Amino acid sequence: MVEKRLWSSAFLMSLFFLVVVACLSPLTILADSLIMDELHYVSLDATLSGFSGLIVGTENNFDLLIMREGTLQRFVLAGLDIPQYDSSKLYSKRLLSFLRSTIGLQATVQRTSSSKGSAAYIWIQPDGESYLIQSIIVSSGLGRAAGEGEIDLSNAEEYAFKKALGVWDEELYTVRATIQEDVRQAETKESLQSHAMPDAKLVVSEIDIFDNGEYAMIVLTASEGGRFDGSTLSIVSRAESSLDEDLFLFASEGVLEMQEQLKIFVTLDRSRQVSFDYDYLWESYLDPRGGHLRIRGRDGSETLFEYEYDRRISGFIVTPLY
């Protein structure tokens, strides 16, 4: 099997170096893809096959909605054992962020022969090369292989285990914590935490929605300064307030001053050119009729915000609920 680690490189010399390395030793190949930045991939002894469709959304955090010839179909990712979504776990947030980043990509869908059509292996080609979504997830430790599927993911799982990625890092951390319980380490950890950079507290301060939800601008303001990596902004389900329809993860280790702002541009069309200044791009949909957004801090604290259109001001009013 061939192991691939995916990250971005903008330099031709780096690309030339990788080609030379690949020729000398075919064990490691690096792919240029912003979508898969910092994700891992172990290639498979499997042939790409199936029908083509467009990924247009996610459902229940783990399933993909795919449009095929005008018909919308929902597919469960076959061959995976994915832990229940936990907003306090970084691997859970990274998985949802990755799946959302595939929206707008063409996919090849290979239904499993043992299912009724809802379970499938799904391939994408973000940089011209084919990648199986299931292998990306397992290789990066964002989930486990579920027994003996139609495509063997055992090498991908072994790779993630050896590198202690994602779910495997959580398990190893638990073992280490159990073995290394002593008072001095606890005191050292407490001392480090007391001197650590505080967490920023983010609030939704402004929303503008244009072209019936085709794109929007969300402005977040830091009511308290500090780090915000690991925080999330989510669009809350209309049917169930405890569920997130979509989620944006702040992965960069930045620091915000009090009252400093972050602008997130939300768009359904990744190719659209806009003149707005913004800090982050989120490929999603914000309902122009109104709805709810949720911010989860690094410490797991949550704040729910309601936004609704007010004709008196010809704009949206944002209200924190709790």
Image (cartoon, rainbow, N blue to C red):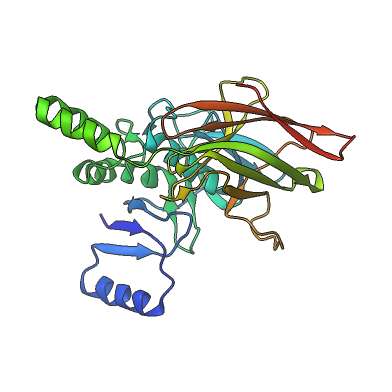
Residue sitting at 61 percent across and 21 percent down?
241
Is residue 226 at least partly visible in the picture?
Answer: yes
In this view, the residue in front, 144 or 276, is: 276
Residue 84, how many percent across, how many down?
41, 25
Q: Is residue 110 visible?
A: no
In the picture, the quarter occupied by the N terminus is bottom left
Q: Position of residue 289 (x, y in %)?
A: 79, 33
Determine the residue located farthest toward the right in the rendered image.
Answer: 312
Is 204 in front, or is 267? 204
The image quadrant of residue 90 is top left
Quadrant location of the C terminus in the rendered image: top right
**Residue 82 percent across, percent down from the top left:** 39, 30
Work out whether 206 lies above or below 24. above
Whether residue 212 is situated above or below residue 17 in the rendered picture: above
Q: Residue at x 54, y 35 (%)?
A: 75
Image coordinates for residue 243, horizontal then vertical, percent: 56, 24
Quarter holding residue 16: bottom left
Q: Is residue 272 above or below residue 54?
A: below
Q: How many marks?
A: 0
Q: Nearer the viewer, residue 116 or 42?
A: 42
Q: Residue at x 80, y 43 (%)?
A: 212
Image side of residue 13 versus residue 158, left or right: right
Which is more toward the observer, 177 or 81? 177
